[in-house]
Amino acid sequence: MTVFISGATGLVGRLLLDALPGPVRALTRRPDRRDLPEHVEVVGEVDLRGVTAVFVHPRAVADLDGLVRAARAAGVGKVVALSAANVDEPLDAQPSRFRGDRNKEAEDAVVGSGLPWVSLRAASFASNTATAWAAQLARGTSCAGLTRTSPSPCCTSATSPRSPPWRSPPTRSTTGGSPSPGRTCSPTASRSG
């Protein structure tokens, strides 16, 4: 039983390589990598010979439909897509698309494959918190009160109230009213008037 992992040396793929006992065929942009477990065969292009399951990463393969068609033609028994909890929302409201993820396309490809499939609709990854908020955390600032449907007023852009906070620098306020740069944002400050 060989599992094919696309995006194998990224954040999610690398964890799969370490968790699966093998054998695993790992698709990566850097097939010269030598720091992977012994049970991993590294490839630089899709090779599904002898593969029984395929992990479809929404950013790792340009032609997601082509990968799934190749899986079906190769007799693969199952396809698994990494997707997102917000995959049914409008595409322009999905923050991961700004980073290149094509969750909707990956999920649609596996669902329409005619093969047994699983879609992993992840809500978040702990490692993404560090990349999304690292600059703010390093500065010692915070942006409390964010939810998916009602972002804190201290963290929205002046030009667009829907701008994700990682797309523009946060503004902060301790006095309430209009947010202003250079001060700390807190839930009570953003609600005070």
Image (cartoon, helix red, strand yellow):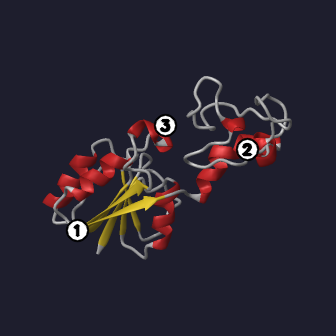
Q: Nearer the viewer, residue 20 or 29?
A: 20
Q: Label 2: which residue? A: 143
Q: Position of residue 58 (x, y in %)?
A: 38, 49
Q: What's under tag 1, amino acid-wise?
A: Pro
Amino acid at pointer 2: Cys
x then y, percent, for residue 18 = 50, 69
Element class at badge 2: loop
User: Badge 3: few (under 14), some or many (20 or more) residues near its Cα, within 10 Å?
Assistant: few
In percent of width and height, residue 125 lies at 56, 58
Work out how far the residue at label 2 is from the one at label 1, CA to CA, in angstroms: 42 Å
Q: Look at the image and tell me whether residue 47 can be seen.
A: no
Asked if one can make out residue 157 in the rendered structure from this viewpoint, the answer is yes
The N terminus - image quarter: bottom left
Q: What residue is rendered at 34% in x and 48% in y?
A: 104
Residue at the spot of label 1: 116
At 46% from the left edge and 39% from the top edge, which residue is drawn? 93
Q: Which mark is residue 98?
A: 3
On screen, residue 108 above or below 172: below
Q: Amino acid at mark 3?
A: Phe
Q: Secondary structure at mark 3?
A: helix
Q: Mark 2 or mark 1, which has the lower sequence index?
A: 1
Query: At numbered mark 1, what does the secondary structure look like: helix, strand or loop?
Result: loop
Residue positioned 76% across, 30% down in the render: 179
Single out the mark in the foreground, 2 or 3.
2
Separation of marks 2 and 3 at Cα, in angstroms: 20 Å
- Mark 1 Cα-neighbour bin, 10 Å: few <14, some 14–19, many ≥20: some
> In the image, what residue occupies the spot 81% across and 42% down?
189
